[in-house]
Image (cartoon, rainbow, N blue to C red):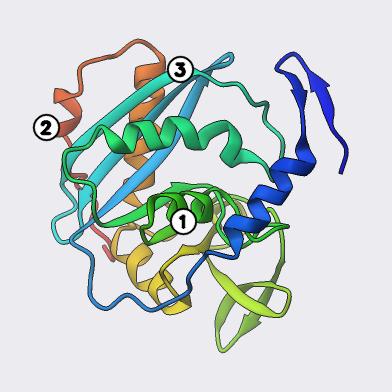
Amino acid sequence: MKNMVSRYGALDLSRAAQAQIIISRKVSIERLGREPRRVIGLDVSYRGDYGYAAAVSIDYATHEIEEIGVAEGITFFPYIPGFLAFREAPLMIKAFLSLKTREGILMVNGHGLAHPRKCGIASYLGVVLNMPSIGIARSLLYGEVRRDGGREYIVVDGRYVGIVIGSGRHAIYITIGNKVDIDDLEAIVLKMMPRKGELPLPIYWADRISRQISRGKRSLDSFLKQGRRSIEPGQ
């Protein structure tokens, strides 16, 4: 893996890849002991090189927005598939740290273990923040999809690291980030998903709010007021 030069300056991708390998070794795959109290969605939107991150804490039982954290700033790393954490994680962490209650499960717009070095942004954040984390994506970055027992799994190096819910353009690729196992993925995501093919609520709101603040809307009160969608999972 070679270095590259862009408008961001010289980038040492070999060192970045090595950092991912080191972080991947710290990922823990373990079953959650109990249902989470909340799920925190994380996403970033852009205007040019300026990023706007949202951390949206959703009550697991009621689906109501409890709290919103935001952060913004210039990104100093270009978009390179496989290296998303170096572009988006700093702003996501800043938004997360602005929350008053920083516990629960992270749900990140990106991948977890379904990654060439088993360190997608969901795994990166889970390890750095020492929290359970799940990756949510609309396309598969790495690995293969295998059907087994009526369920579609994402397989990397012979290990099941995720599941696929929905199909075609409605497929959602859900992967282990940190401190969860394969059985946790479906239970948690379906609980937070209005309907198959729709984004889980934490990602839906994080995406929507980050886009709104990128367009200049600064008041978060309206989001807190409308923070429960009329569509419930399973309806």
Q: 164 and 93: which one is in front? A: 93
Q: Where 97 sits versus 220, above or below?
A: below
Q: Residue at x 39, y 50 (%)?
A: 129
Instruction: Please provide percent x and percent y for residue 211.
Output: 41, 24
Q: Do we see residue 199 in this rendering?
A: no
Q: Secondary structure at mark 2?
A: helix
Instruction: Please provide percent x and percent y for residue 27.
Output: 52, 65
Q: Residue at x 50, y 52 (%)?
A: 122
- Looking at marks 2 and 1 on the same chain, the residue that comes earlier in the sequence is marked by 1
Q: Where 40 sits versus 167, above or below?
A: above
Q: Do we see residue 135 in this rendering?
A: yes
Near mark 1 (Cα within 10 A), the count class, few <14, some 14-19 or many ≥20, is many
Q: Residue at x 42, y 77 (%)?
A: 30
> To which residue does mark 2 refer?
225
**Identity of the amino acid at label 3?**
Gly
Q: Mark 2 or mark 1: which is in front?
A: 1
**Position of residue 120 in the picture relative to residue 69 (left or right):** right
What is the quadrant of the C terminus in the image?
bottom left
Q: Mark 1 or mark 3: which is in front?
A: 1
Q: 73 and 136: which one is in front? A: 73
Work out how far the residue at label 1 is from the one at label 3, CA to CA, in angstroms.
23 Å
Instruction: Please provide percent x and percent y for residue 133.
Output: 41, 58
**Identity of the amino acid at label 2?**
Lys
- Looking at marks 2 and 3 on the same chain, the residue that comes earlier in the sequence is marked by 3
> To which residue does mark 1 refer?
127
Q: Which mark is residue 73?
A: 3
Q: Mark 2 or mark 3: which is in front?
A: 3
